[in-house]
Image (spheres, helix red, strand yellow):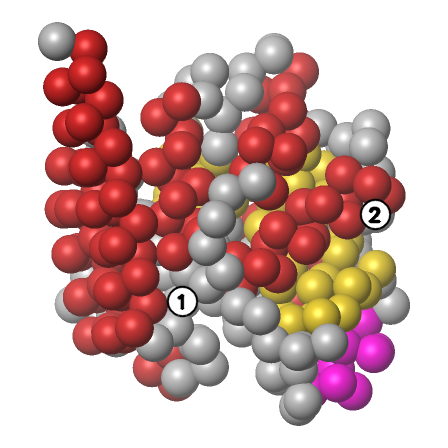
Amino acid sequence: MIDDAAVLIPAYQPCGRLAGLVSELRRDFSRILVVDDGSTEGRDVIDSLGVEIVTHPRNMGKGAALRTGISAILERWPDISGAVTADADGQHLAKDIVRVAKRLVEDASHGTVRLVLGVRRIGREAPFKSRFANEWTRILFRFFAGYAASDTQTGLRGIPAALFERVASLPGDRYDFETRMLVDAKGHPSLPVEIPIETIYIDGNKSSHFRPFADTLSTQGALWGAGLRRIFAGGARK
């Protein structure tokens, strides 16, 4: 049983796969928190989970749900090493969530402060919207953020407790929040470490709430903003 890390799952209109995932995770984790991001469907699934639940009165976006969850974990379990974020739609296997959590706890035991990223191999078998978003954002990310990340859109992340307040203070209410989290990692004590995970797409990833145009635009906006800040900061130092 992993008692030193919590699992944080933002959920919006969840299906039965969330219940299956939580059931598996309860074998390994004693601390699981689900943020219901204003769901109008799937409430029966959420109510059946038997874990800690925080509810938004309306849909506020994945970034807002993650911030709410991080703040709730910090308040409820202030003694843990960190939290692992995972998606509610079945894209992340319980065994991969466990692997990320174990690395997070191991890092904490050595005093290492960094994000732990569960990264997918996104090949031609992946849905176009996922392949397009990740490939384009990855190119921009390396240019603007100043370091390389092989999967900038992964929702499976280990966040050390030492970074909770810093991460929760980042702007962005949708998927751009996750991009800002990675950009901000340039200022962490150590850059993120990547752990390969299985790539799973169910029914062409139809259950994903990612909007290819709008959300790709917002994540790119976060990267352009980071790039401009780096340029002006560099000019100011000359």
Name which residue type carries label 1: Ile
Magenta span: 42-49
Q: Position of residue 207 (x, y in %)?
A: 46, 81
Tell me the quarter of the image containing the C terminus. Answer: top left
- C-alpha gap between disc 1 and disc 2: 25 Å
Quadrant in the picture for residue 37: bottom right
On the image, the x and y values in percent for residue 198 come to 41, 56
* Nearer to us in this view, 115 or 237: 237
Identity of the amino acid at label 2? Answer: Ser
- Say what secondary structure mark 1 lies in: loop
Q: Which residue is mark 2?
A: 30
Q: Is residue 11 above or below residue 147?
A: below
Q: Is residue 174 above or below residue 3?
A: below
Is residue 147 highlighted in magenta? no
Q: Residue at x 81, y 71 (%)?
A: 49
Q: Image check: 209 left or right of 54?
A: left
Total marks shown come to: 2
- Left or right: 127 as drawn, with respect to 194: left
Residue pointed to by mark 1: 200
